[in-house]
Amino acid sequence: MSIELFLSIASFALSFGGLIPALFGIPTRSRVVIAIIFTALISITGTVLYRDYSHDTLVNQVMDEIVNKIGDNVWTYDQIHEAVLYQPPEITRKSLFRLVSEDKIGDKQETFIKDGAEWKVRAYYLK
């Protein structure tokens, strides 16, 4: 998070926290406590909302990138993870889960034989 955003949230929280006690005629000591509580609540809420929005934006970007990269091919998770420029694994997994649940891509189990051993791998393809 940038310092400008944090300062904006903090200044808004302080202003709002000071406004509430002033409107209701609460004694000075209680005003300070209420202002601190409102400041903390608003700052934390703003920060959490911003981080959630940023996370969701990143997941949507990775979803678009996955759809563009797969094309007519059938890819495994490892191939997709490498193609999306090594985003954190939880972002890639969340993007794949959303794409499959929204029925934009399909998934199936593929069987590969390597060195005499049979491997079952989940593969993803564009519907």
Image: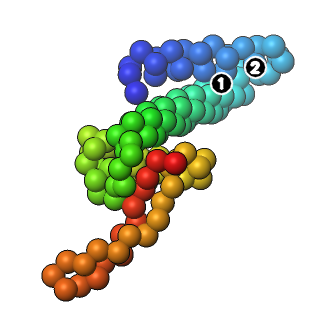
Question: 72 or 48: which is nearer to us?
Answer: 72
Q: Which residue is mark 2?
A: 21
Please tell me whether mark 2 sits on a helix, a strand or a loop: helix
Q: Mark 2 or mark 1: name the one nearer the start of the chain.
A: 2
Scheme of colours in the image = rainbow
Is the residue marked by circle 1 packed among few (<14), some (14-19), or many (20+) residues within 10 Å? many
Question: 58 or 62: which is nearer to us?
Answer: 62
- Measured from the top left, where is residue 55 in percent x and y? 47, 37
Q: Are marks 2 and 1 in contact (CB under 8 Å)?
A: yes
Q: Please report the residue visible at 52 percent of the width from the left and 48 percent of the height from the top.
A: 127
Q: Please report the residue visible at 52 percent of the width from the left and 20 percent of the height from the top.
A: 10
- Measured from the top left, where is residue 15 in percent x and y? 63, 13
Identify residue type, mark 1. Answer: Ala
The outermost residue toward the left is 115
> Is residue 44 left or right of 77 when viewed as pictured?
right
- Asked if one can make out residue 51 in the rendered structure from this viewpoint, the answer is no
Question: 48 or 110: which is nearer to us?
Answer: 110
> Is residue 127 left or right of 92 when viewed as pictured?
right
- Asked if one can make out residue 9 in the rendered structure from this viewpoint, the answer is yes
Q: Which mark, residue 35?
A: 1
Compared to residue 70, the image places residue 24 above or below, namely: above
